[in-house]
């Protein structure tokens, strides 16, 4: 694929050097969505990934490139909280890891999603306190999760990608 | 765009000008369903073995203990061009006991596959598989079971299990998509587990030849893909009969017949242009039970059904919407598809109906592999859809591709 070009490999190597420094620093907190910036490191370690940072106005995007091709973007507010996550990759990532304390709400919503007819369709959870979307097919899944109440002012769902 | 890519498109365009089917617009001709041949299996759209399905196509599959005539034919197996590999619910395997696949250390191998909204889990076992006159020998399949081994948390991943007939809505899944194996590299993709005698299962690498495999890829003949053939459905119908034809251009009954080839990328996706927006990561999938796409521009025409209704997750427009979208292959082929979306709650009120040509629902808002267009089973009504397998040779284009 076009994504695997030389420049991205170089970038990866640079990022890897940076990541080594980061990993050595703090004891990571468990769980990401709603967690503090340190929990991003936990995700990075669990995903065996490399990480890049991008500032975007009122928040910072931490992009983790996992060894298996999954890309996870974690959105950290100025207050240092992860308010949103977006990801895409060949398989669905570890949602327990990414959703942290919101995982149980996600799992319960999935159990409740069964309708009158058997359905094989995107996951669309839109609840007070949690929005999760998961779609795609084997080898090309994608998803987002965010806590509406935590979105910095001026940031909307469309910014999370 | 690179100069090379421009050249590719120019060359493709040139090739198209000599081919009748290429770049064709929407088609109103009636598709012909192949009725006979050793490479033809009947399929049926009905409520399925759990009496619960909307837009599910089912086939019969015969599995045998390898090298023996101890066999069982299992019907109600979902025809899924969106995945690869044969998966059978253990409770449906009543008269055959298949050998367990073992890792090099002798521990049994299990597999986890996460779909949208559910996961399948259970041991990898080996079977001779027969569908119509086609045979695959000593093929790894997944046997779906909650009890043979306990699914690790990483497998369930917040999803309900689809390891029973009631939860799957089928006796199994016949994954006959573009992939030859469900993973395709020796990492095991995180799908494969080794289970110790203590009962705990941990992820493991898995040789490609040991992986759960698209049965068609292991057939001795007609092994480069399939054609899913279902007649047009006017509105909603109780039962629809069609054919699953094995091989593309390998027999007198499975030629392209003027179908347009849309080549796809390594993630089995192409582009769909809808309402002025191009949706990358789009796909054709018989295992999806509707058209799934996002339409923000004509809201509230395409209202989501109430989350408390039995049609939650589908569209409930106040009146049927006539829409169109354009498929664009990686090879530059392009064609417009007309389709309609009706109110799913109204559709489902017809309790006898199982085939719904106007069923659709929202896909996701996501960047990076953003909102996509999923042509589910309704697309197959009235189109003979060719699904070629990666790494094979098939007429009309570079595999993998879809054609119709």
Image: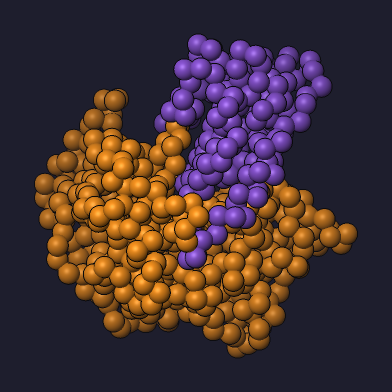
Chain colours: A purple, B orange
Q: Residue at x 72, y 32 (%)?
A: A31
Indicate left or right for A10 with B205 as reference.
Answer: left
Can the viewer see residue B98 in this picture? Answer: yes
Q: Quadrant of residue B394?
A: bottom left
x, y percentage for residue B109?
A: 72, 61
Determine whether B273 is above or below A80 in the image. below
Q: Which residue sits at x=59%, y=24%?
A: A150
In the image, residue B209 above or below residue A23: below
Q: Quadrant of the C terminus of chain B?
A: bottom left
Q: Is residue B389 visible?
A: no
At horizontal 22% and vertical 49% (from top left) the residue drawn is B324
Residue at left offset 66%, top offset 77%: B91
Q: Which quadrant of the rendered structure holds the N terminus of chain B? A: top left
Residue farthest to the bottom, as pictured: B69
Q: Nearer the viewer, residue B385 or A126?
A: A126
Is residue A146 shown left or right of residue B399?
right
Asked if A53 appears above or below B141 in the picture, the reply is above
Q: Nearer the viewer, residue A19 or B383?
A: B383
The image shows residue B170 at horizontal and vertical percentages of 53, 72
């Amino acid at each position: 694929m076009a994504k695997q070009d030389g420049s991205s490999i170089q970038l990866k190597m640079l990022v890897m050097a940076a990541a080594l420094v980061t990993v050595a620093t703090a004891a990571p907190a468990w769980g990401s969505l709603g967690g503090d910036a340190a929990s991003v490191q936990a995700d990075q370690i669990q995903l065996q990934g490399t990480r890049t940072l991008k500032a975007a106005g009122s928040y910072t995007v931490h992009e983790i490139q996992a060894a298996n091709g999954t890309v996870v973007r974690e959105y950290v507010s100025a207050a240092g909280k992860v308010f949103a996550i977006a990801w895409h990759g060949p398989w669905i990532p570890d949602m327990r890891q990414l959703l942290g304390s919101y995982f149980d709400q996600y799992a319960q919503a999935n159990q409740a999603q069964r309708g009158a007819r058997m359905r094989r369709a995107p996951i669309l959870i839109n609840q007070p306190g949690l929005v999760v979307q998961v779609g795609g097919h084997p080898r090309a899944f994608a998803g987002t999760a965010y806590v509406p109440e935590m979105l910095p002012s001026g940031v909307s769902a469309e910014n999370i990608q | 765009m690179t100069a090379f890519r421009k050249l590719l498109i120019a060359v493709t365009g040139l090739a198209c000008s000599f081919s009748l089917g290429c770049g064709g617009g929407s088609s109103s001709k009636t598709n012909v369903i192949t009725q006979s041949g050793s490479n033809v299996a009947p399929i049926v759209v009905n409520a399925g073995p759990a009496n619960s399905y909307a837009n599910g196509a089912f086939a019969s599959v015969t599995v045998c203990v390898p090298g023996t005539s101890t066999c069982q034919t299992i019907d109600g197996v979902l025809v899924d061009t969106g995945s690869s590999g044969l998966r059978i619910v253990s409770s449906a395997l009543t008269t055959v006991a298949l050998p367990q696949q073992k890792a090099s250390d002798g521990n049994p191998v299990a597999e986890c596959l996460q779909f949208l909204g559910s996961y399948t889990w259970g041991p990898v076992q080996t079977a001779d598989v027969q569908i119509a006159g086609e045979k695959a020998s000593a093929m790894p399949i997944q046997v779906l079971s909650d009890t043979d081994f306990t699914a690790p948390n990483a497998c369930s991943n917040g999803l309900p299990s689809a390891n029973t007939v009631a939860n799957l809505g089928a006796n199994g899944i016949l994954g006959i998509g573009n992939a030859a194996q469900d993973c395709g590299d020796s990492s095991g993709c995180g799908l494969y587990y080794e289970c110790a005698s203590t009962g705990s299962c941990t992820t493991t690498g898995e040789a490609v030849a040991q992986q759960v495999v698209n049965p068609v890829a292991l057939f001795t003949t007609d092994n480069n893909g399939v054609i899913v053939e279902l007649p047009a459905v006017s509105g909603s119908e109780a039962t629809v009969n069609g054919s699953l034809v094995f091989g593309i251009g390998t027999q007198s009954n499975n030629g392209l017949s003027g179908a347009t080839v849309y080549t796809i990328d390594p993630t089995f996706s192409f582009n769909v242009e809808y309402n002025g927006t191009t949706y990358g990561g789009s796909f054709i999938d018989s295992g999806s039970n509707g058209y799934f796409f996002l339409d923000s521009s004509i809201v509230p025409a395409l209202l989501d059904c109430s989350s408390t209704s039995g049609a939650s997750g589908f569209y409930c427009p106040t009146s049927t919407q006539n829409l169109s979208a354009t498929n664009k292959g990686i090879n530059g082929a392009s064609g417009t598809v007309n389709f309609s979306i009706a109110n799913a709650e109204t559709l489902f009120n017809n309790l006898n109906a199982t085939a719904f040509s106007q069923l659709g629902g929202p896909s996701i808002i996501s960047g990076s592999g953003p909102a996509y267009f999923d042509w589910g089973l309704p697309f197959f009504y009235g189109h003979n859809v060719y699904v070629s397998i990666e790494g094979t040779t098939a007429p009309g284009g570079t595999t993998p591709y879809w054609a119709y």
